[in-house]
Image: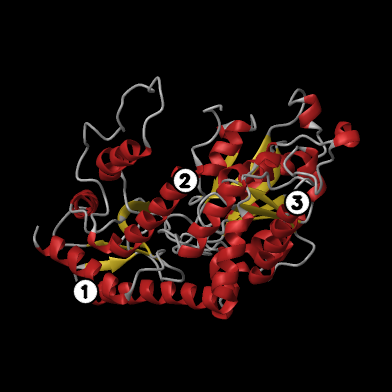
Amino acid sequence: MSTLGDLPPDQARLWMHRVAGWVADHRDKIEQQRITPDGLRADVTAAPPAMPEHGEPLAAIFEDFERAVMPGVARWGHPRFFGDVGSTTTAPGILGEWLAAALDVPAATSVSPAAIEIETTVLGWIRALLGLAETFEGVVYDTASQATLHALAAAREATGLDVRRRGFAGAPPLMIYVSEQVHGSVEQAVAMLGLGEKSIRRVEADGEYRMRPTALRAAVARDVHARLRPFAVVATVGTAASAAVDPVPAIADVCRDHGLWLHVDAAHGGAAAVLPEGRWVLDGVGRADSVLVSPHTGFFVPAGFSVLYTRRPEMLRAVGGAAPAEVRVGADAERREVDDALERRFRALEAWMVFRAFGRAGIEARIREQVRLARRFAEWAEADPGFELAAPVAMNVVCFRATPPGRSDAEVDALNRQLVDQLVATGRLYLTHTRLGGRTWMRIAVGSVLTTEQHMAEAWSLIHDAFRGR
């Protein structure tokens, strides 16, 4: 009898149960653990250093996982982890990921029609949550950066210059307009599309770090006069630094007047629109050509599931950025359309489980609580004479800083960076620093469903005591 194939069924079942128990224990005890690794360890990489010639027992592998891997892993699901947009790890999401891994089917294949149906259903649910019109067609990507790249490629195609086929030879320089607070993925996309850094126009922001529509209109007019070719604007709903919301209606007016593609990056802030009181963040977004949403940012879905909605799917398909609704096989194989999105994992299953387990009301309540906790923290910082806020808190992000009297701007910036480093080094709190208006600010983002007001109070106490102790 051959010894090849998978693990023996009894071993596989035993270890699947053991790993499930480990995951449950990890979630139960995560609050008592360090958030960040205790310094750099020489043995972080799992033993052995070279691939073994022969298979090893799972017991030995798992022992190395606990001994060598876990000490070097940050616990993003910790209730006092406030980095980036926090962690949206949830039990339904974990279960959905297990099932998706066990099935291991591509999400867009007629061989598994249920995968297509669930993805279509989930995209419809998200569209309804955000109040987008049914004219927006959704496409799933693994990352927001990949979706941004394809959206801007579609915008380039919509110019009618036929760049995909003819290249840039003889074409006028194409210009794209972004906020000063635009996400770095836009710069990456511009570089990958061969447009060059000089094609990016950074439009002046107002006192709350939002793009100024008057400055945008003036920048477009200058480039038209210089015989350049404006082709797209990226508006942001929830900037990465401060969760600022660009004035999309006024930006859409500029795009309409000049025939520009409007892409709205709502990866960070779109979830706020689930709340009736937060619907305003998507005002005017219905006029966009494409809208980026990341369900793992605010919708409690595991990472690796981003959605691009567009009113012009034909442009997305023209650049290979959208998979066909059905992949033909067998006798129709020659009619198959090739696209990297066809190989994406069945991520929609994870979202399907999360949305069903929590329901619309549950998702809304959790988002509202995270916004409440952020505002509660902001109240404490604003009430303390030694601290100040960068901007009003509209979402789950707070930007603030310590402002000791009698110090220069450079000294205050350095102090706030040092405070962040000092606090993170304790392993009891994780936050970041960012630059706004040329100054350094501390930043927290509430994202874990495990975070309570007690955790926020503990975080504020740690920050306050660290500042007073210097």
Disc number placed over residue 258 in the picture, else none: 3
Q: Name the residue under label 1.
A: 384
Residue at image position (15%, 56%) is 407
Image location (x, y in percent) of residue 241: 42, 55
Q: Is residue 11 visible?
A: yes
Q: Looking at the rendering, in which quadrant would you find the N terminus?
A: top right
* Farthest-out residue, left: 469
Position above or below: 47 against 360: above
Instruction: State the residue at coordinates (37%, 58%).
Output: 77
Badges 1 and 2: C-beta atoms under 8 Å apart?
no
Mark 1 and mark 3: Cα distance apart in space: 47 Å
Nearer the observer, 162 or 50: 50
Q: Specify few, some or many for label 3: CA neighbours under 10 Å numbering under 14, 14-19, or 20 or more.
A: some
Find residue 208 and report its horizontal and vertical position in percent.
45, 64
What's the mark number on residue 10? 2
Q: What residue type is labelled 1?
A: Asp
Instruction: Determine contact: label 2, label 3, CB under 8 Å.
Output: no
SS at badge 2: helix
Q: Name the residue rendered at 47%, 74% in the picture.
A: 366
Mark before the other along the chain sequence, 1 or 3: 3
Give the vertical position of 419 relative to 456 (above or below).
Answer: above
Between the C-alphas of marks 2 and 3, the distance is 66 Å
Q: Distance between the residues labelled 1 and 2?
A: 60 Å
* Mark 2 closeness class: few <14, some 14–19, many ≥20 residues within 10 Å: few
Q: What residue type is labelled 2?
A: Asp
